[in-house]
Image (cartoon, rainbow, N blue to C red):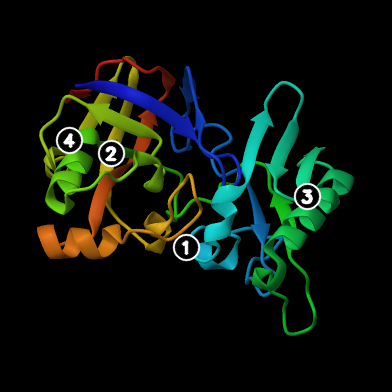
């Protein structure tokens, strides 16, 4: 089996970015994966101590399906974030107070009534914290999905389910349907990289959102439960030995 495709998601809830390679570090996610997020005004995030909090505290597809209509590109070299939507485009630095203020204003205006404010009038804020990832897991991990498992879901429901609904970092080709669920606690090797499989990924309402239309037009959570008796698709793994990975790289079970 091998890596069919490799992705990062720089802004939580927004555009997948395909990667030609990624340099992994033990205990860390893919560089710039979920590095940025729009914190809702009623979020419980402590800016002085940015620990993990649930996704509903941020702009996210589970609550804000319309966010799928935005197209973003993070440029590593220039440190600029480019955003395009129906209301126009913006290029700003996600690292400076000025750039964060511009991004806050853009996303807040885009959300409209879906932008939430705190009890004391606290407004949404675009946030970045060095070394922090706004991922759905309480620790920094890599998410993987076997494409054959996705194909099994598609066959069961008799309709395509775009892989982008599930927002994985690594899509695997060449394993049997649901085989990844048997890997709990085992090590995967990709070249010199090693990672330990931690748990299955239980899916959420974000998967209902069509990545092209930004409409909720399917219910993979319900489909998984009805056809397979669970709501899981994919696995989380923690990097234990670093190195570079690329699409096409072989994946071995140790």
The residue wearing badge 3 is 103
Q: CA gap, disc 4 to disc 3?
A: 38 Å
Q: Is residue 229 visible?
A: no
Decide which of tag 4 and tag 3 comes sooner along the chain.
3
The residue wearing badge 1 is 62
| Disc number placed over residue 140 in the picture, else none | none
Front-most of residues 72 and 9: 72
Report the label total. Answer: 4
What residue is shown at x 39% (from left), y 63% (from top)? 205
Q: CA gap, disc 3 to disc 1?
A: 21 Å
Decide which of tag 1 and tag 4 comes sooner along the chain.
1
Assign a secondary structure to mark 4: helix
Assign a secondary structure to mark 2: strand
Above or below, 136 relative to 225:
above
Determine whether, in the image, residue 248 is placed left or right of residue 78. Answer: left
The residue wearing badge 4 is 148
Q: Are marks 1 and 4 in contact (CB under 8 Å)?
A: no
Q: Outermost residue, right direction?
A: 98
């Amino acid at each position: 089996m091998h890596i069919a495709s490799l992705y990062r998601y720089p802004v939580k809830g927004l555009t997948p970015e395909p990667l030609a390679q990624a340099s992994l570090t033990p205990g860390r996610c893919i560089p710039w994966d979920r590095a940025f997020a729009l914190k809702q005004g009623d979020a419980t995030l402590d800016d002085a101590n940015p620990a993990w909090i649930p996704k509903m505290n941020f702009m996210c597809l589970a609550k804000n399906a319309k966010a799928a209509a935005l197209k973003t590109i993070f440029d590593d070299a220039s440190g600029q974030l480019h955003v395009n939507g129906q209301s126009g485009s913006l290029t700003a630095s996600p690292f400076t107070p000025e750039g964060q203020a511009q991004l806050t204003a853009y996303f807040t205006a885009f959300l409209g009534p879906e932008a939430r404010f705190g009890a004391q009038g606290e407004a949404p804020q675009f946030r970045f914290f060095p070394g922090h990832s706004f991922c759905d897991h309480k620790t920094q991990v890599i998410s993987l999905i076997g494409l054959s498992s996705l194909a099994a879901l598609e066959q069961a429901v008799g309709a395509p389910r775009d892989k982008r609904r599930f927002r994985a970092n690594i899509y695997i080709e060449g394993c049997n349907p649901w085989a990844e669920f048997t890997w709990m606690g085992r090590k995967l090797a990709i070249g010199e990289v090693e990672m330990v499989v931690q748990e299955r990924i239980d899916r959420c309402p974000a998967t209902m959102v069509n990545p092209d239309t930004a409409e909720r037009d399917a219910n993979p959570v319900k489909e998984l439960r009805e056809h397979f008796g669970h709501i899981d698709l994919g696995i989380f793994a923690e990097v234990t030995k670093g190195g570079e990975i690329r699409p096409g790289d072989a994946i071995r079970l140790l």
